[in-house]
Image (spheres, rainbow, N blue to C red):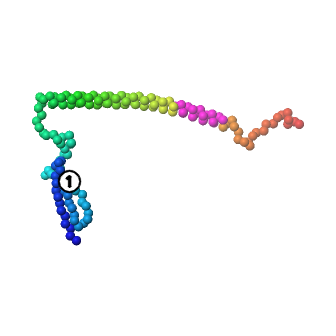
């Protein structure tokens, strides 16, 4: 069996060369390979917003340029204010959580102390109760002097 293959190379609009290979005798279909056209073998992908634009000189005195700069400056101010507000909100939340943590730790300390007092009280009561109760079967009989003379 002899294998014969045929290669076709095309370049698409984005500057990527696509190589199509067909194998005749194997019966397997091969996937097209994407090969960059540039000799460096790589590079940055161009975002869709920049694909149709040319690197032309921008007139800094034009109205369009001034409007774009103004919009960008407003967006930057808005972004910085938003970032500053977020930092302030985070700091405020941290302070709230610290206060709550201190309050909860004080409550833990108080409840631990209360538990200790109640535990000691319970143990003392249980000890006194055990001393007053006599086990069953070891009852002492008291003799009545009036009945013993009969």
- Secondary structure mostly seen in magenta is helix
- Measured along the vertical axis of the image, is residue 61 above or below residue 25? above
Say what secondary structure mark 1 lies in: strand
Q: Residue at x 31, y 28 (%)?
A: 85
The residue sitting at the right extreme is 150
- Measured along the vertical axis of the image, is residue 120 above or below residue 30? above
Q: Nearer the viewer, residue 75 or 87?
A: 75
Q: Which residue is mark 1?
A: 34
The image quadrant where one finds the C terminus is top right
Within 10 Å of disc 1 (Cα), the crowding (few <14, some 14-19, many 20+) is few
User: Can residue 136 be seen in the rendering of this structure?
Assistant: yes
What stretch of residues is rendered in magenta? 113-129
User: Can residue 40 be seen in the rendering of this structure?
Assistant: no
Q: Residue at x 60, y 34 (%)?
A: 122
Residue 95 % position (x, y): 37, 29
Residue 2 % position (x, y): 20, 70
The image quadrant where one finds the N terminus is bottom left
The residue sitting at the bottom extreme is 1
Q: Quadrant of residue 148?
A: top right
Q: Quadrant of residue 147?
A: top right
Horizontal relation, residue 22 to residue 57: left or right: right
Q: Residue at x 21, y 61 (%)?
A: 22
Residue 26 % position (x, y): 24, 66
Magenta segment includes 87: no
Q: Residue at x 57, y 32 (%)?
A: 118
Horizontal relation, residue 18 to residue 128: left or right: left
């Amino acid at each position: 069996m002899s294998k014969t293959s045929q290669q076709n190379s095309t370049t698409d609009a984005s500057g990527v060369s696509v190589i199509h290979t067909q194998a005749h005798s194997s019966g397997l279909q091969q996937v097209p390979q994407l090969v960059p056209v540039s000799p460096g073998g790589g590079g940055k992908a161009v975002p869709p917003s920049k694909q149709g634009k040319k690197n032309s000189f921008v007139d800094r005195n034009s109205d369009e340029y001034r409007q774009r700069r103004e919009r960008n400056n407003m967006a930057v101010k808005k972004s910085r204010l938003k970032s500053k507000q977020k930092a302030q909100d985070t700091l405020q939340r941290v302070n709230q959580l610290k206060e709550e943590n201190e309050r909860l730790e004080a409550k833990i300390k108080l409840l631990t102390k209360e538990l200790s007092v109640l535990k000691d009280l319970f143990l003392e009561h249980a000890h006194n109760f055990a001393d007053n109760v006599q086990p069953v079967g070891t009852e002492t009989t008291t003799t009545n002097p009036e009945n013993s003379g009969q």
